[in-house]
Image (cartoon, coloured by chain):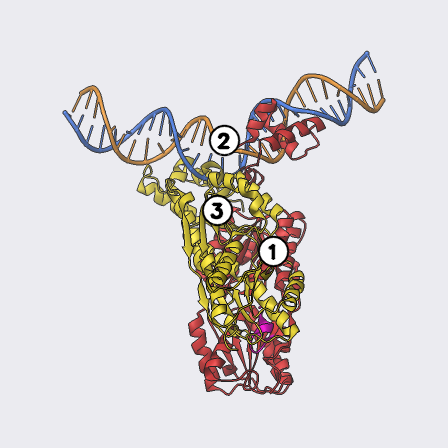
Chain colours: A red, B yellow, C blue, D orange
Amino acid sequence: MENVTLRMLAEKLQLSTATISKALNNSHEISKETKQRVLALATELNYVPNPYASSLRKKSSSTIAVVIPEVADSYFAEAINGIETIAQEKGYHVLIYLTHENFGKEQAILRDFQSGRVDGILISVTTETAAAKHDLEQLAKEIPLVFFDRVCEEVAAAKITTDDVESGYKATEHLIANGCRNIALLSVSKNLSISNKRMEGFQQALAAHQLPFSESAVTYCSNDAAANHALIKNVIQLHQYDGIVATTEKLSTAIYLVCEELQLHIPNDIKVIGFSNLSTARFLNPSLTTITQPAFDMGKAAATLLFKALKSSGFNLQEENLVIPSTLMVRNSTVGK
Amino acid sequence: MENVTLRMLAEKLQLSTATISKALNNSHEISKETKQRVLALATELNYVPNPYASSLRKKSSSTIAVVIPEVADSYFAEAINGIETIAQEKGYHVLIYLTHENFGKEQAILRDFQSGRVDGILISVTTETAAAKHDLEQLAKEIPLVFFDRVCEEVAAAKITTDDVESGYKATEHLIANGCRNIALLSVSKNLSISNKRMEGFQQALAAHQLPFSESAVTYCSNDAAANHALIKNVIQLHQYDGIVATTEKLSTAIYLVCEELQLHIPNDIKVIGFSNLSTARFLNPSLTTITQPAFDMGKAAATLLFKALKSSGFNLQEENLVIPSTLMVRNSTVGK
DNA sequence: TTTATTTACTTAACCGATTAAGTAAAGTAC
DNA sequence: GTACTTTACTTAATCGGTTAAGTAAATAAA
């Protein structure tokens, strides 16, 4: 069976394709009766318009792109949920692209967007993206773009973040309040504003409580689990930390593993707090105190903002900057002695 | 700045658009010198072809669709990773659609695929999809389609699954081997082959060990966490189960919660094994014995199979049926007394 | 009654690529 | 030297919608 096209409907009804198109788009130029006849035949023949024909002509695709480092992290899984929920509501399609923390891949993906493949972009950048500031700046001028979570500070575009400085502060202060005096921070990248902000909060909290800050307290981890494991093990063995702030989900559990190996008891020997969206945090052994980001809501907010820009052309996306606070969930990995 | 098109390149080089198109597609009809000139100008002007124009003409989009219930489950998160990795390798784009376990949404999404929006489909069906057998059958005839994980048994299409019967058997037998005699099964849907198979394995294992099977041992949970919680609590209170098999990830942690509330000790009072891909299973309290599905590999396999079909038209996808075994990971939630 | 406006269409151009078919010039065969 | 290929292009049709511009008939306004 051939694909049903406008032309076929037009021929069967002895009308022009223009009439059919307008009828299906509920144009006021078409009479009620004709609309009904067209609609009836369309449903009967199960007509589904070719999206590429209309995208080509209309120069818009009802498609948005979500560019993220990976979905392994539960943060991004939830964010996708939020994004897709809104997109489906608005009748948009969602293309997903994983950069695998690879800057080159990200570049290639973004370059493709010059083609008009998508009407808008939601992006959480790579750890190495600093270098692409200019490209992103340019892209944001051409296509509505919203950063979420991992933003590029320097680029003028909409941003949805959580209160990273405050969260870093809260996490650190919480450890201090629970008796820690020698606290380490596990970070991921010097190029990531999100990392730097969390570290900023970390430093501020130390300062506020007259605790010294030394560069050696900060460990930069990578995307390589094995390497991170070795790194963390080394750091913990070398210094006598009594508290650790893990700025990503995966690093939190990496710490658990290392402590198990080193026979360090959490929280007695060392207290652990992690930035994490794990729904299982409360079931861990010991249950993990977390800074939980509003992943789903951030995804929803990012998508909502993007669609606002897509629907109303006058909307200035650049100015938007929404901060949704994270929550400190106190559990057993930081309390007790 | 206007978008760069073939026509613009053609005018600048005093050539026809046909020549430009062929040059960029490395056609043998075009001389080396011309190709170089074209390529040089294309890169200079940062030409990116309009995908919709070429999709329209070629009747193929280099795009595949992934249709899944949700990404919240870590199984699907990993599967997406696997799929996207392969897709990117092959130069394909990935559209993602969440059905939110809603059959109507799934129907609408699948209907849209009649339009030629995607060249191929990877799908893990809703719990209610049984009704759509016919539609799926039809769709599979028109567009290469691969089921993964949650397949529709009756539909003739490629399927990537894990060994669900065996896994159900293994899980149950493991509980029996550890002393359980009164075992419950938490399932999700009577319509889902994956559920039924796991239950089949459950029954087989009971029978093999001369344990009685009663319908009341099986509880069908829904997608509603609160309802599930009440249901599970009720079931556990009512019967004196000494072991539970949770056929999904979320149900596993739901059990932990219920046991906490009922002050039941895992594994002493009740042993728990769950179908789960949680990377944190080993850190739970107690660490969770799991049947771990090869999510990433299943995603990769599904995508690989799909692309095989897309590249070589002679390939008969219907016949393909790949089973990748799951692994039993014994941990503390099932051992000890 | 004549003119203006509205209604309900049609015609044809267009979006930007791909490709079948055609062609002029150069190269090769005999 | 004529016929046949090959090379390197061009022309024009095409994919399937959308939309600006045009038109004939019906209706409203004067």
Q: Are marks 3 and 2 in contact (CB under 8 Å)?
A: no
- SS label for mark 2: loop
**Can residue A98 be seen here?**
no
Stretch of the chain drawn in magenta? A274-289
Marks 2 and 1 belong to one chain: yes
- Tell me if mark 2 has few (under 14), some (14-19) or many (20+) residues whose alpha carbon lies within 10 angstroms of its own: few
Q: Please tell me whether mark 3 sits on a helix, a strand or a loop.
A: strand
- Find disc 1 in the rendering and name its residue: A83
Query: Looking at the image, is B161 positioned above or below residue A177?
Result: above
Q: Amino acid under label 2?
A: Glu
Residue A283 falls inside the magenta stretch: yes
Q: Picture coordinates of residue B9 (x, y %)?
A: 44, 41
- Tag shown at residue B331: none
Taking depth in this image into account, of B329 and D29 the one nearest to the observer is B329
Disc nearest the viewer among 2 and 1: 2
State the residue in front, B26 or A183: A183
Q: Position of residue B93 (x, y in %)?
A: 48, 50
Chain of the residue that carries numbered disc 3 in the rendered image = B
In the rendered image, residue B86 lying in the magenta stretch gets the answer no
| Residue denoted by label 2 | A2
Residue hosting label 3:
B63
Q: Residue at x 60, y 56 (%)?
A: A83
Using a 10 Å C-alpha cutoff, classify the residue at mark 3 as few (fewer than 14 neighbours), some (14 to 19) or many (20 or more).
some
What residue type is disc 1 on? Ile
Residue D6, percent across and down?
Answer: 25, 33
What is the quadrant of residue A123 in the picture?
Answer: bottom right
